Image: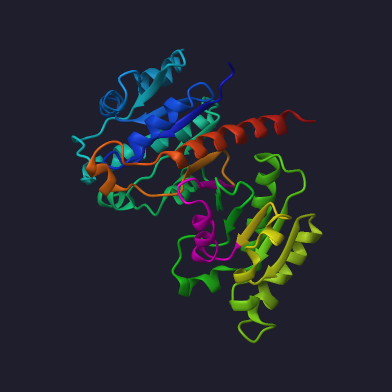
Amino acid sequence: MNRPIIALTCGEPAGIGPEISLRAAWELRDEVRCVLLGDAALLAQTAYDIDRQMRVAAISIQAWRNTGLPNFPADCLCVIDCPAAEPVRAGQLDARNGRAVLQTLDMAVEGALNGAFAAIVTAPLQKSVINDAGVAFTGHTEYLADVTKTPQVVMMLAGGDAPHLRVALATTHLALKDVPAAITAESLARTLDIIQADLQGKFGIARPRILVTGLNPHAGENGYLGREEIEVIAPALQAAQQRGIDARGPYPADTLFQPKYLEDADCVLAMYHDQGLPVLKFASFGHGINITLGLPLIRTSVDHGTALDLAARGLGHADHGSMMVAIRAAAEMARKQKDAQASP
């Protein structure tokens, strides 16, 4: 079977990342060839504790670079060993392991850019551990943009239980007081161009329909509750339409997220993090995914964090549903991208 090869970074080793990565990769082994990146000894022990039928075989980074991936059978998961600096204790963070977590991301990006991996799927990591290790780090999205030298990326979440609900963000991890200044005609133009390009190239949607929220309550109420809609957002949408992008709005965010509107949309562009994401997470938390648009590679992720409290309780408490959705979505996007590139 022609299974796409997906790099799966296992995230914070003291969290639920190793468990949900193994469980999802094992369940999907007949559909997708997942290559796990993490501490091989930890993953082997975790696999043994989950299911003694689960087989794991490791390869070093250098061996992978020299010879490529071994041709393991479908019932054996491949691990590229990114060893932790210190022993891992479930639920207990250790900054000394922060750089090993970053190494998994670096290897995944390297493999995706050289064609070894069709896509990247990331398990959750702990930002504080990376920062405590001496590396300035604000999140997966920003880090991947930096290492791939991508000037702008767009965060989009999609609902697993609501497969047609996709919410992209004009701004990401900003304090609310900083959002209005960050929304400019130029930034919205770049954001809409990225959404349009990836919905076409990675999702196979020929003519994407994008609904755009306003910034203020009631989309500014004709200027009485703010003028950003009149002075920034509406002109940016008009310019996008002239470029051939079907972007409509700005709409009041409190009434836009209804089936009668969403059934005609391929994506909603919200102005800030907590404007769009609570709706999506309410609809599909635990089965939603995070997708980074604009990168020169495909990257999906789960919609939750490291869940250190669950990891401390032992195996069997974490839900790997979001990881399953993220892997399947990455594989489908890889197929759509391949088809788009093959089309004349």
Q: Is residue 128 left or right of residue 301?
A: left
Residue plotted at (29% across, 43% down): 15
- Residue 58 covered by magenta stretch: no
Residue plotted at (28% across, 29% down): 46
- Residue 272 covered by magenta stretch: yes
Counting from the top left corner in percent of width and height, residue 55 is at 35, 18
Q: Which residues are magenta?
A: 270-293
Q: Is residue 77 left or right of residue 207?
A: left
Q: Nearer the viewer, residue 57 or 154?
A: 57
Q: Nearer the viewer, residue 267 or 125?
A: 267
Counting from the top left corner in percent of width and height, residue 11 is at 36, 40
Q: Is residue 112 left or right of residue 193?
A: left
Q: Look at the image and tell me whether residue 58 can be seen.
A: no
Q: Is residue 158 above or below residue 250?
A: above
Residue plotted at (31% across, 25% down): 47
Q: Quadrant of the N terminus?
A: top right
Direction bottom: furthest residue: 224
Residue plotted at (72% across, 71% down): 234
Counting from the top left corner in percent of width and height, residue 12 is at 31, 42
Q: Quadrant of the C terminus?
A: top right
Q: Look at the image and tell me whether residue 79 can be seen.
A: yes
Q: Is residue 109 above or below residue 278?
A: above
Q: Is residue 49 left or right of residue 186?
A: left
Counting from the top left corner in percent of width and height, residue 316 is at 31, 36
Colour convention of the picture = rainbow
Q: Nearer the viewer, residue 103 or 36?
A: 36
Q: Is residue 291 above or below residue 265?
A: above
